[in-house]
Image (tube, rainbow, N blue to C red):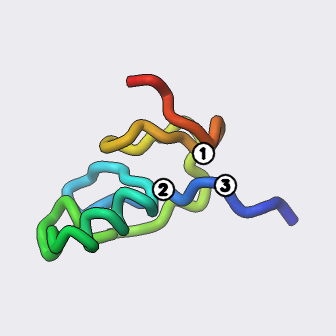
Amino acid sequence: MTAPPSVRLAVMEDDTVLCSGCVDELHAEGVCETAGTIVHAWLADPVGQACACCGVTDGEGQETGR
């Protein structure tokens, strides 16, 4: 059994990738019910993916420096 990813990444309805922290922030700000804020699926294997908002990746567990 493998360990769960340190950062959870989701594909949104508009095909962008966001981390769980950014999804939570958008919902806390009241920005919801748009294609960019509705989670379509959580990535089970997020290798090579990065959050479109903050740049965090699962592989690094930190910002990519975009």
Task: Determine contact: label 2, label 3, CB under 8 Å.
Answer: no
Q: Residue at (67%, 56%) from the top-left corner? A: 5
**Mark-to-mark CA distance, 2 and 3:** 10 Å
Q: Is 62 placed above or below 29 here?
A: above
Work out whether mark 1 precedes mark 3 in sequence or the reverse, and give the earlier one. 3
Q: Residue at (32%, 69%) from the top-left corner? A: 39
**Mark-to-mark CA distance, 1 and 3:** 6 Å
| Residue at image mark 2 | 9
Looking at the image, which residue sits at the far right?
A: 1
**Residue type marked 2:** Leu
* Mark in the foreground, 2 or 3: 3
**Residue type marked 1:** Asp
| Residue at image mark 1 | 58
Q: Secondary structure at mark 1?
A: loop
Residue 62 versus residue 4: which sits nearer the camera? 62
Q: Secondary structure at mark 2?
A: strand
Q: Classify residue 14 as left or right of residue 40.
A: left
Task: Determine contact: label 1, label 2, CB under 8 Å.
Answer: yes
Quadrant into which the N terminus falls: bottom right
Where does the image place residue 63, in percent across and percent down from the top left?
50, 34
Q: Is 57 placed above or below 24 here?
A: above
Where does the image place residue 60, in percent across and percent down from the top left?
64, 36
Residue 58 versus residue 14: which sits nearer the camera? 58
Mark number for residue 6? Answer: 3
Task: Please rate how many residues cluster around mark 1, counting C-alpha atoms within 10 Å: few if below 14, some from 14 to 19, many from 20.
Answer: many
**Mark-to-mark CA distance, 1 and 2:** 8 Å
Q: Residue at (72%, 63%) from the top-left corner? A: 4
Q: Secondary structure at mark 3?
A: loop
Work out whether mark 1 precedes mark 2 in sequence or the reverse, and give the earlier one. 2
Where does the image place residue 20, in percent across and percent down from the top left?
45, 62
**Residue type marked 3:** Ser
Q: Is 48 placed above or below 1 here?
A: above
